Amino acid sequence: MAAGEAVVVGVRVRPFNDRENNLNAVVCIDMEGPTTRIRNIDTGDEKTFTFDESFWSHDGFEDDGTGYLRPLPNSKYADQRYVFDTFGQRVLDNAWNGFHCCLFAYGQTGAGKSYSMVGYGNNKGIVPISCEEIFRRIGQEKDPQKRYEVTVSMIEIYNEAIQDLLIDVELRPKKGLEVRESKALGIYIDGVIKRPVESYEAIETTIEEATNHRTVGSTLMNATSSRAHTVQIIEFKAVKDGSATVSMINLVDLAGSEKAGQTGATGDRLKEGSMINKSLSALGNVIEKLADRGSEKKKNVLIPYRDSKLTRLLQNALGGSSKTIMICALSPASSNHEETLSTLRYADRAKKIKNIAVPNENPQERLMRELREENEKFKKIFEAMQGGTMPSADEIKEMGLAQQEIAAMEGALAELNKSWEDKVAESREQQEAARMRRSSVNGVAALKKNLQPMMVNLNEDKTLVGRVRFSFPPGRTLIGGLGDESDSDSESGSESDSDSSTGSQPEGEKSPEEMFEDEDESPHIELGEGVARRHAVVFHDNDQNLCTIYAASEEGLKQTFVNGKSLRQLLKSQGLEEVICRQKDKPEAAGIELSHADTLVFGRHFFVFVDHMVCAPEILIASGQVDYAQAKREWQMEQLSGVHESLIVATRGGVLGVSHVMELAEKDEIIESQKAEIAELKQQMVTMKAELDRYKKMAGGRLAAGANMLGELYADELLESQMDEISKDIQKTFKDAIDQMNDVQAIFSKKALREGLSLETEVLPEPILRDPGTPRRQVRISFADELPS
Ligand SMILES: Nc1ncnc2c1ncn2[C@@H]1O[C@H](COP(=O)(O)OP(=O)(O)OP(=O)(O)O)[C@@H](O)[C@H]1O
């Protein structure tokens, strides 16, 4: 039996980004030859890993005048060309030798996966350089008898659905494509388009088309690169004297890993993967098990490929006959130490995987042979039946499977038997038909849509601004997302708890929420994650040419923002009652009128409202009147002032509830911009814990049993003064308090909070601060267990 060949693993560290530069970030990665070292600047701990390649792309480079980043003399900077020459060429060599190959990029969001795979501007990544190189090599073929046929497929896995990016969004099967397995064909995507390409330009156009489909897909609209996995499949066939070898090159740009909750972890931690990052968690699990199998510890361990579409698709690349390369993108900043260490561990496990790669034989011959074998089986069973022997249950099952297998093989054979010219002509026809359909069907619809008010998306990437448009036809448009009913139930649940004193709802009678649900209305605009199933409603009064926005749930009241202010705040400031819009026809709830160029945020999805009577979206975007950064800043400021307000309310009442603190902890956006300080604060907390452990020892029996009290963070004494005297100093105090909250969140993370951290505040009976009459706020932090690592 052939010896296994290990997955080739390389890691690459990027330069600091602007934010890290502004925060004077500290490098925690060092590379020397194939060795990568990571240092925890808080504890001084160092860990060393060895990979096939360690690409240092952090510093030692300059712009060559065209935007291309090249190494300075004598620097170890690995530029795009170097990375391609090291890994990309290897992939192509393997494909030329008839092997299936896979190259995938893994890493935390923003760590540089897309930079390595696709690249930016003149710094082209492995994918485009490989495409160029394929046709360069074909052009250099000396053997006149040898022909090459190249097809390209582009898919995206988002929310556990495989979408063909070469099919128009409107024409895609709703649930996406299926991954199937056949003995003869191996793992394949049923019905995926294989576009024949005859030049680099043709591949480039195809990729562009796929990218456009990706960004305008309504359900995918908010699938930023970090949320979806993109796979480009290049089928490469070399034909000579009627015989052929086929190699599949899979180039995979995985979703960002940090949201997967430590995907490098195993067991219970892996279960935390949400719907969106489920596949990343599954990938971690598969790698873990394959690594175990590779090290012979658990040779017969079952590999859970079927846990996700991604692992099913990569089954051959990970545990089969493919030559596989993995490139892990690393952030250099110490503030990302934890995620980077997790990526390194992931990479370390991946390199233990061993595949047995065998060159692919002529697919036609193999298919014919397999077909003959299947037919033989059938024949035997028939002969037995003619002789009076009834087939067993197993044989009947086998016959069913064989029938399926034969059908798949016949389809594949028919495809293989088509001449290349026929395939090219067929593909052209399909593209032309799609183009016609688009222009005829969508043309009228698009025209109609453009004659209505709409909202268009805002995005950090300027080229994506305005790519997604949702128009508001006359009447009611319900905006919703992936959030389930619990998004709105959680609030109503707590309301009905507090209502219980006034008499709970009689059984059989429906709450207003339930009545609304009974309408069983799916959102007209689906936005995805972070948006309640029923979030907001826009009512377009055609006669008045007026659009008004209403909250469609409690969540919608809090998480729908117009020009940075939540609907709740806006209603309050206009003296309107907070009412949720439940009626299907004419809303009776209080709403906010929309004006041209208003920014709208649903959860974290940013849009700008366009009044078609004022101007077209293109003109508004080009005018520079709205920009994402500005909208995001406004929204962030509002989030911050929301925190201030919570603290004011909390401090007035003397009590800061757990739900408040949990809510604060959810404010990832704010936390994101404070990661550097958090690292420092984390260190302080460790010191505090040591202090308090000492204190606990001293206090001994005086502490209540089991109360593992960690600390008491006293609000500044200025917090005790009257709130109407809010001065600069108090603002500072609030900022400190916010920092503390963020600190708490960052250190213990959502996971730690769920695992046992509870936060509570209480009013001390014995005031210690200057004014003995004023109660003080005390925050007590207790742990079920230890400090999470
Ligand atoms: N080797 C590098 N040299 C220079 N800049 C880099 C390098 N790697 C990444 N960058 C820059 O870092 C930023 C983030 O990189 P990139 O978009 O590739 O991250 P990502 O891991 O693909 O993120 P996501 O998961 O969100 O898709 C980009 O602005 C990119 O230009």
Image (tube, grey):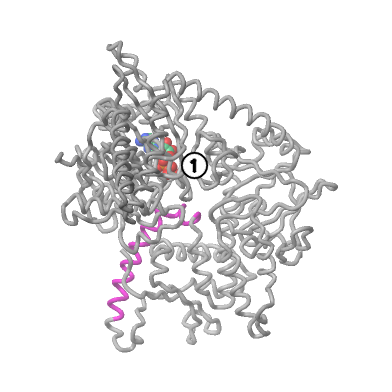
Can you see residue 627? yes
Query: Which segment is the magenta one?
Result: 669-696
Instruction: Where is residue 184? Give x, y as percent.
Output: 32, 38
Quarter residue 183 falls in: top left
Q: Is residue 320 above or below residue 203?
A: below
- Residue, far right: 543
Q: Is residue 327 left or right of residue 760?
A: left
Q: List the residue tagged with mark 1.
A: 163
Query: Position of 612 compared to 653: left or right?
Result: right
Question: Measured from the top left, where is residue 71 in percent x and y?
Answer: 30, 28
Q: Residue at x 28, y 11 (%)?
A: 142
38 versus 141 height, above or below? below
Give the position of the C terminus as an image quadrant. Answer: bottom left
Q: Amino acid at mark 1?
A: Gln
- What secondary structure is found at the residue carrying circle 1? strand
108 lies left or right of 657: left
